[in-house]
Amino acid sequence: MYTLAVKRDFIARHALIGGNWGPENLPNSHHYVLELHLSGNSLDQYGYLADIIQIERLLEETIARYRERMLNDLPEFEGLNPSLEHFARILAHTFNERIDAQNLLTLKVVLWEHESAWASYEIARPSDAS
């Protein structure tokens, strides 16, 4: 299976809710590192799993929505604790809706909150992709 990955970093803010997590309950910033992993068994007619230029553009557009923003204030986090896990899932679904490469079997977001903590969310794409 082929895997293509792209990586970007950005800073965003959040305040955890629903529990007592000390300083994390107060607004604070994280230097996130986002890895987008795309996998599939076949390449397109040009020998690509996906067009990396389009993927990088999509990554930049998506990150721009969150860069320097307070996650708690965004509609996709309404009623949710803005945890690393929720954020990884939201990002994965956003990418999945916008990437149209037919040969992709999986899409995975790995989101680092700092150098020793990360969460990931993986989506299996339709099995008729080949």
Image (cartoon, rainbow, N blue to C red):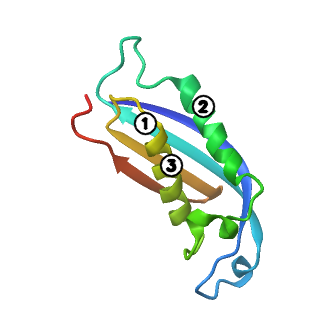
Whole-number angstrom distance, CA of label 2 to CA of label 3: 14 Å
The residue that label 1 is drawn on is: 38
The residue that label 3 is drawn on is: 94
In front: label 2 or label 1:
2
Q: Earlier in the sequence, mark 2 or mark 3?
A: 2
Q: Secondary structure at mark 3?
A: helix
Q: Is residue 69 left or right of residue 91?
A: right
Residue 112 in the image: x percent, y percent?
60, 55
Question: Where is residue 79, by image quadrant?
Answer: bottom right
Residue 129 in the image: x percent, y percent?
26, 32
Tag count in the figure?
Answer: 3
In front: label 2 or label 3:
3
The residue that label 2 is drawn on is: 56
Residue extending furthest toward the left: 128
Q: Amino acid at mark 1?
A: Leu
Residue 1 in the image: x percent, y percent?
31, 30
